[in-house]
């Protein structure tokens, strides 16, 4: 885990989706304080675990189309984009 104080106001690597290339890529984002939020534990079918707020956006493959879906709208069986090991 990284302390928010160590990255606040700085640029950090994040996963994003390149719509033109249709693939997950690593880009950078500026870290801002969005307040205190409840975190949920998401476990993927492959056994990966992530913690995110209900409003966190995931890239999800639904009906053959990549869509931006918030955690609170994910459904069992959704295919979320992850970085391959």
Image (spheres, rainbow, N blue to C red):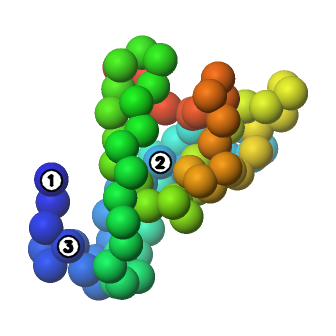
Query: Tag 1, which secondary structure?
Result: loop
Q: How would you rate the neighbour count of disc 1 (Cα within 10 Å): few for under 14, some for 14-19, many for 20 or more?
A: few
| Rendered view: 21 above or below 16 | above
Q: Position of residue 42 (x, y in %)?
A: 42, 38
Foreground label between 2 and 1: 1
Q: Which residue is drawn at 36% across and 84% down?
A: 35
Left or right of 69? Residue 84 is: left
Which label was assigned to residue 1? 1
Disc 2 to disc 3, C-alpha distance: 18 Å
Which label was assigned to residue 4? 3
Q: Mark 2 points at which residue?
A: 15
The mark nearer the N terminus, 2 or 3, is 3
Left or right of 1? Residue 38 is: right
| Rendered view: 63 above or below 15 | above
Disc 2 to disc 1, C-alpha distance: 17 Å
Q: Which residue is drawn at 32% across and 79% down?
A: 36
Q: Residue at x 41, y 82 (%)?
A: 34
Foreground label between 2 and 3: 3
Q: Nearer the viewer, residue 28 or 40?
A: 40
Q: How would you rate the neighbour count of disc 2 (Cα within 10 Å): few for under 14, some for 14-19, many for 20 or more?
A: some
The mark nearer the N terminus, 2 or 1, is 1
Please report contact status of discs 3 and 1: CB closer than 8 Å, yes or no: no
Query: Tag 3, which secondary structure?
Result: helix
């Amino acid at each position: 885990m990284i302390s928010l104080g160590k990255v606040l106001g700085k640029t950090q690597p994040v996963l994003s989706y390149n719509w033109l290339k249709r693939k997950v890529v690593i880009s950078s984002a500026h870290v801002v304080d969005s307040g205190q939020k409840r975190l949920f534990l998401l476990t993927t079918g492959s056994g990966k675990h992530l913690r995110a707020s209900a409003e966190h956006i995931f890239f999800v493959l639904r009906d053959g189309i990549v869509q931006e879906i918030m955690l609170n709208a994910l459904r069992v069986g959704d295919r979320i984009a992850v970085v391959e090991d």
